């Protein structure tokens, strides 16, 4: 019976794909919730950590040998990818992290497998494993307003020994690549074929999920049912350093606090990266010190309290705002290369650390960091970020809270396709 079910199920999937293909689906965007883990503050697309730098998606699994037909929901449908597959060549074309083991095991297995080294960006660990094909269940498509059930999508991902999952939040099964790689999760979804664009709207609280859209929208949130978020975005070029660079970089002209430029040598040549595995924006020491000095000057009338590590400037929180109304602190403006300004308001600049304390939520990364500025998730929360790989630009909204919208206000009620 199990076997029959599996065969039937497989036939059904194939059939529904054919159907969607032939009908040209009315949907052009996938949608998924994004959950903030309470313990680690990491952002999870159930049940995968979102990583803007990973060359491919991976999950804890064991490759199963099976015939072509019999594979079903419970056991998954993991098929090895062979070493001469183009996608294998793509996966192996990105320089692995130097800590990863050598891929030289072809001598043992021949060309039946595609050796890759999945990497855990939280623990900085790496294992030898292999690329496979699998089905992703429970993904949804959207018309921009509500999710709709979607049968299943086939993607390439790597298996990894489950030991690679330790240090990741409980329940997380793997890491979803959201990088420039052809093997990135958004770029692996087809039928409907989605544009080479995705949006992240990270939640600030672990009690209400945010949302990610894969495709080109539109995007609506319930507080403003007639506002397509695309119409409020500013854009700046997204720099791809080489055809094999994975992460997303932008350039900044200057940083200002309440309109006064932070005294810094030119930022134009500095590397500014976006990261979903760094919690707080991390600055090279000279930039950090200049920012803290300026922010300190701009807030000199506000009572100080004892510093809470890893921060270095903490204010008495009752003096800068209430839990309900957000913080009244000077705004921090990042003027991007295009001249458009990404404004960081109190909710994204001050972290409540308890005991009546709110700290400037930026971190000193030391003087020898690879990237002068790494923008972390705390500064992205409740901001709409639209990664347009097609046009190589980043769309940003600044805080949606100023418009009464949060990243948790996408309508998650499923509706039937009409
Ligand atoms: C790969 O392994 C084989 C056999 O162990 C060895 O002969 C070969 O030199 C290795 N190649 C590299 C690049 O390490
Ligand atoms: C958070 O961590 C604590 C202690 O390690 C653990 O007991 C709890 O289950 C964790 N909660 C979540 C949501 O992972
Ligand atoms: C809370 O803040 C007060 C005043 O700054 C300080 O005396 C006290 O030790 C703090 N308590 C904790 C648990 O940090
Ligand atoms: C969410 O969508 C459902 C279905 O379209 C609708 O009935 C409901 O009113 C929407 N909720 C909000 C808060 O707009």
Image (cartoon, helix red, strand yellow):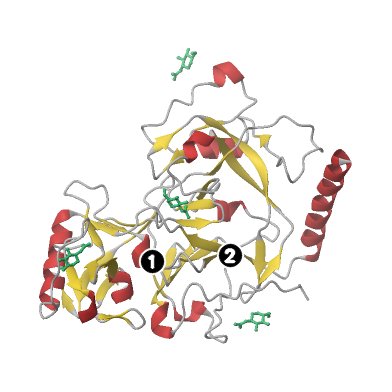
In the picture, which quadrant includes the N terminus? top right
| Location of the C terminus (image quadrant) | bottom right
Say above or below: 403 vs 192.
below
Q: Quadrant of residue 318?
A: bottom left
Residue 16 at x, y percent in the picture? 81, 57
Q: Residue at position x 81%, y 37% from top?
A: 70
Residue 53, image x, y percentages: 43, 49
Residue 240 spot, x, y in % from top left: 39, 54
Query: Observer-nearest residue: 398 or 36?
Result: 36
- Left or right, residue 296 beside residue 212: left
**Mark 1 highlights which residue?**
380
Q: Which mark is residue 215?
A: 2
Say which of 415 and 356 sits in front.
356
- Measured as percent of width and height from the top left, residue 231 is found at 49, 81
Circle 1 sits in a helix, a strand or a loop, which is it? helix
Q: Quadrant of residue 357?
A: bottom left
Q: What separation in Å lies between label 1 and label 2 (alpha carbons)? A: 20 Å
Of tags 1 and 2, which is closer to the observer? 1
- Would residue 244 be found to the left or right of residue 6 on screen? left
Specify few, some or many for label 1: CA neighbours under 10 Å numbering under 14, 14-19, or 20 or more. Answer: many
- On screen, residue 272 versus residue 306, left or right, reads right
Give the label on residue 286, or none: none
């Amino acid at each position: 019976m199990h076997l029959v079910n599996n065969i039937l199920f497989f036939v059904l999937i194939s059939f529904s794909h054919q159907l969607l293909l032939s009908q040209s689906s009315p949907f052009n965007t996938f949608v998924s919730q994004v959950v903030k883990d309470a313990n680690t503050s990491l952002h999870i697309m159930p049940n995968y950590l979102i990583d803007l730098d990973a060359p491919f998606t991976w999950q804890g699994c064991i490759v199963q040998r099976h015939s072509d037909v019999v594979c079903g929901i419970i056991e998954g449908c993991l098929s090895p990818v062979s070493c001469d597959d183009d996608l294998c060549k793509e996966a192996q074309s990105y320089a692995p992290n130097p800590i990863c083991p050598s891929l030289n095991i072809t001598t043992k297995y021949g060309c039946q497998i595609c050796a890759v080294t999945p990497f855990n960006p939280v623990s900085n660990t790496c294992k030898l494993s292999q690329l496979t094909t699998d089905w992703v269940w429970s993904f949804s498509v959207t018309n921009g307003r509500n999710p709709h059930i979607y049968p299943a999508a086939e993607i390439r991902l790597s298996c990894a020994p489950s030991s690679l999952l330790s240090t990741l939040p409980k329940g997380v099964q793997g890491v979803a690549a959201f990088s420039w790689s052809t093997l990135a999760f958004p770029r692996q979804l087809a039928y409907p074929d989605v544009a080479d664009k995705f949006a992240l709207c990270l939640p600030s609280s672990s009690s209400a999920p945010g949302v990610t859209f894969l495709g080109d929208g539109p995007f609506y949130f319930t507080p403003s049912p007639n506002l397509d978020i695309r119409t409020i975005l500013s854009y700046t070029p997204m720099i791809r350093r080489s055809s094999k660079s994975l992460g997303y970089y932008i350039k900044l002209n200057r940083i200002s606090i309440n309109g006064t430029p932070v005294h810094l040598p030119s930022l134009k040549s500095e590397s500014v990266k976006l990261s979903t595995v760094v919690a707080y924006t991390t600055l090279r020491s000279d930039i950090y010190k200049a920012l803290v000095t300026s922010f300190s000057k701009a807030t000199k009338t506000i009572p100080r309290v004892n510093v809470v590590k890893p921060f270095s400037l903490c204010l008495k929180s009752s003096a800068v705002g209430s839990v309900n109304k957000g913080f009244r602190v000077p705004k921090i403006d990042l003027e991007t290369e295009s001249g458009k300004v990404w404004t960081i308001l109190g909710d994204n600049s001050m972290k409540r650390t308890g005991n009546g304390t709110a700290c400037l939520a930026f971190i000193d990364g030391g003087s020898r960091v690879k990237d002068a500025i790494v923008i972390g998730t705390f500064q992205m929360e409740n901001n709409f970020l639209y990664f347009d790989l097609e046009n190589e630009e980043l769309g940003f909204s600044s805080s949606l809270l100023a418009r009464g919208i949060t990243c948790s206000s996408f309508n998650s009620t499923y509706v039937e396709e009409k």
